[in-house]
Amino acid sequence: MGIVDSHHHLWDLSLFQYEWMPEDNTILRQSYLPADLAPILEHCSVEGSVVVQADQTVEEAKFLLECANDFAWIRGVVGWVDLQDEKVGDTLDELMELGPLVGIRHQVEEEVDENWLLRKETLAGLKELSNRNLSYDLLVKPMHLDQIPTVCNELPDLKMVVDHIAKPNIRDRVFQSWSDGISKLQPYGNLFCKVSGMVTEADHNNWTPQDLRPFVQQ
């Protein structure tokens, strides 16, 4: 079985806003489309990729599904829907008919309500994912880690993935509080973790592998 990368982004600045993207970051702030990624995957002997939402709109989810239909190496799409919408099930059904939707992600880290993940409306939306065998990507920060066991217990059949090891503050070596939180997730068989995104949380100009090692080993 070949390598399938579980997390790539595609974005088109002519179509979507990507409000999180810094205006002055000229490397990020340009369109990256399937034609840009395909030769890199081939060079690295990666057979496929799962592409993940970067804009919190259903329209972007449809765009990614269109890409997946055009490029066979896109094995799945993790899109976005409004999980608190009463009609979220209908939206999920519509997207699943368009292409290989495999999961949903919401940028919990940006929510003003620190308990957004535990709101009854959110849990109801997550239940709709579980009913359809879709996964949920947890884009959270360390302060949210204590909430995840509650979600696991409420929805034991929902497969969930912690993105970017929950974005610890590697730059300032804030390890123990993150370690305590991530350790509490170990017992849950429906929960997985992407060991990714660490350089973003480290010192961009001066990071070393030693800075990342304790977080990977944990």
Image (cartoon, rainbow, N blue to C red):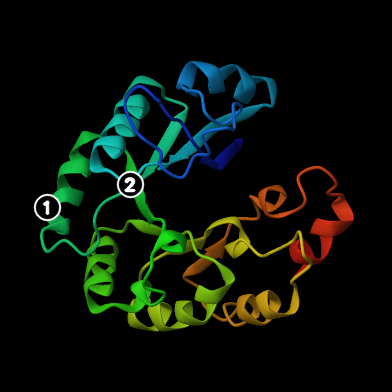
Residue type at mark 2 is Gln
- In this view, the residue in front, 122 or 101, is 122
Note whether 50 is above or below 195 in the view shown.
above
**Helix, strand or loop status at disc 2:** loop
> Does residue 163 appear left or right of residue 93 in this picture?
right
| Identity of the residue drawn at 84% across and 58% down | 211
Separation (CA) of disc 1 from disc 2: 17 Å
**Which is nearer the N-term, disc 1 or disc 2?**
2
Residue type at mark 1 is Asp
Q: Where does label 1 land, which residue?
A: 90
Crowd rating for badge 1 (residues with CA inside 10 Å; few <14, some 14–19, many 20+): few
On the image, which quarter does residue 70 sit in? top left
Tell me the quarter of the image containing the C terminus: bottom right
Note whether 150 is above or below 164 in the view shown.
below
Q: Position of residue 193 (x, y in %)?
A: 58, 61
| Identity of the residue drawn at 34% across and 78% down | 118
Which one is closest to the eye, mark 1 or mark 2? 2
**Helix, strand or loop status at disc 1:** helix
Q: Which residue is most to the front?
A: 24
Q: Where does label 2 land, which residue?
A: 56
On the image, which quarter does residue 156 sit in? bottom left
On the image, which quarter does residue 12 sit in? top left
